[in-house]
Image: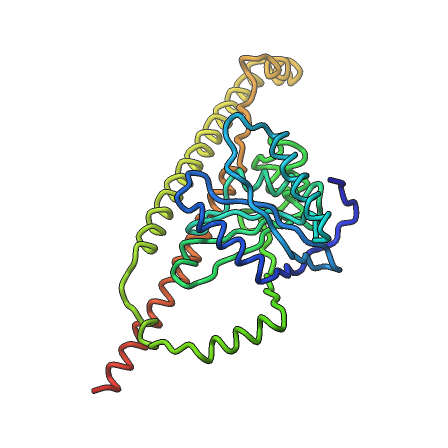
Amino acid sequence: MSTIEVDVPINKVLIDGQVILQIIRHCQSERDSVDLAQGILLGMLVDNCTEITYCFPFPEFTEADTDNDIEMYQLDMMKYLRSINMDHMQVGWYRASPFDLNVIKEMLDSQYTYQKHIHESVGLLFDPIKAAQGNLSMKAYRLSSKVMEMYGQGNSEFTVSSLLAAGLSYENIFEEIPIEIRNSSLCNVYLAQLKRSTSSAPMEYLTLGIDSQLEKSLRLLSESMEELHQEAGKLSVYHKALRMHQQKQHSLLKKRGGDSSKARDDDDSKTNRPPPAPYRLDNLLIANQTNKFCQELNQYVSQSFSKLFLAESLETSEH
């Protein structure tokens, strides 16, 4: 991997339909596995567009496998693809993401590593739960430039003051890149014929039953809100400890008769240091995930209400 110095913005992800079918098949084959399905995306960078033309999955690694074994597997696969004149340039990674569970620490670490060495890298997340219900949910994400800069400086940089200075919030951690699906002309003709020959009852799409997706989403939202409440409690404890420290420093300064040098010497002692600033990256990730859950629930409920009104209109017209 070689680091790209020119910062070219990525405005679009162009993905072949064959790649989507490969990802769906891989995620379905490992739906009963403990680990989520994931793999490597291959393609090229054309202007400001990341084109994805092929992918291959990661096998199920064991605890005995090391990072070097995983890296050698990737290199061997790309070497074999190159030998048969297929696109072998790595442009990102993909993984299964049930219920839009995309904001996790592992994802941020992976995307930072890929994006640092391969600028055009994207993280592709696929929701197999929605796909089983007939809704293709695939999203491409990249880390914002602010996160890349701060994350490269170390975990200690994610404090309240540094986040405020950089203008970083839970809304601009990730950048969602629009996805465009590309098929060959022959495939488009086949899909047109398939759509014309397939006849399905329209009432099948108006089912009003509340499935387990809504229940699971609400449970995940509740758990996310609980984690967010715990992070707020940690911040409250920090502000309380900081306020006590400042009051103690003020009393010491008053006791020393306004001699700030002696008070500063007392402040440098190990027993009288200010409390360390809390690490706020986890809070940003949880807030971002909570926001995603709310958006998904809003979309799901809107579709349910649309079905309800449409079914009511059909029932009225029949009478």
Residue 276 spot, x, y in % from top left: 55, 25
* Image quarter (top left, top right, bottom left or bottom right) of the N terminus: top right
Image position of 209 with respect to 316: above or below? above
Residue 36 spot, x, y in % from top left: 47, 43
Specify the farthest residue to the front.
84
Image position of 226 with respect to 91: above or below? above
* Image quarter (top left, top right, bottom left or bottom right) of the C terminus: bottom left
Residue 87 spot, x, y in % from top left: 70, 53
Q: Is residue 156 visible?
A: no
Image position of 198 with respect to 83: above or below? below
Residue shown at 72%/59% (left/top)? 48
**Is residue 1 or residue 65 the one in the foreground?**
65
**Is residue 47 or residue 61 the one in the foreground?**
61
Residue shown at 47%/25% (left/top)? 241
200 sits to left or right of 314: right
Residue 98 spot, x, y in % from top left: 43, 49
Specify the farthest residue to the right.
6
Which of the 4 image quarters holds residue 202?
bottom left
229 sits to left or right of 155: left
Residue shown at 61%/60% (left/top)? 15
Q: Is residue 72 visible?
A: yes
